[in-house]
Image (cartoon, rainbow, N blue to C red):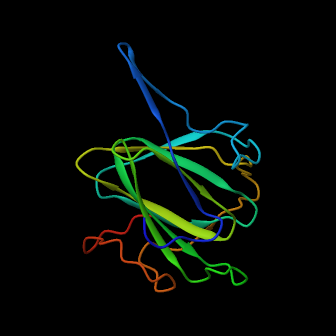
Amino acid sequence: MGTTIDGVLVTPLRVIPDERGWLMEILRSDDPHFSAFGQVYMTTAYPNVVKAWHYHKKQTDNFTCVSGMMKVALYDARTDSPTHGVVMEVFIGEKNPALITVPPGVYHGFKAIGNETAFFVSVPNLPYNREEPDEFRLPPDTSEIPYDWGLLPGLRHG
């Protein structure tokens, strides 16, 4: 996997197949990295679409790609972190089922890779607060994060 960010966990997920199909547990309340339940949501990204960057001040994210593949990039913006300024990249999805746990203060985003829509399932530890969202954004091509998503000219996704 290469470079890691303090507090970010990548937990391999196990696929259990049988003659009817397959099952994959994503997050259990008895997992050591589980902290609390806020909500469950799903989002998608069409091929080559980037959804980035954002971070939370309070919320811990737990997410995976359940269909397709995605490149996840993370940037540690926490000034008190031993990995402040580190960029991390992980490929997850059907070919590499894994749960990524992202602590508060770490920017993250993803890009759908391949030729199909990527389906992303997230289980954050706090529910989304519509009145005061705990979400702070930067555009994918920001100069504040040393990362190149490989965006096509004229296309900005966030």
Q: Answer left or right for 157 relative to 104.
A: left
Q: Nearer the viewer, residue 49 or 67?
A: 67
Residue 81 drawn above or below residue 44: below
Residue 117 drawn above or below residue 6: above
Within the image, what quadrant is residue 89 found in?
Answer: bottom left
Q: Answer left or right for 143 relative to 21.
A: right
Q: Answer left or right for 65 relative to 134.
A: left
Q: Answer left or right for 35 relative to 118.
A: right
Q: What's the residue at 77%, 45% (across, down)?
A: 36
Q: Nearer the viewer, residue 101 or 12?
A: 12
Which residue is outermost to the top? Answer: 20
Residue 115, x across and y down, in percent: 22, 48
Which residue is outermost to the left? Answer: 115
Residue 131, x across and y down, in percent: 76, 55
Residue 38, x across and y down, in percent: 73, 43
Residue 5, x across and y down, in percent: 58, 71
Within the image, what quadrant is residue 56 found in?
Answer: bottom right
Residue 110 drawn above or below residue 130: below
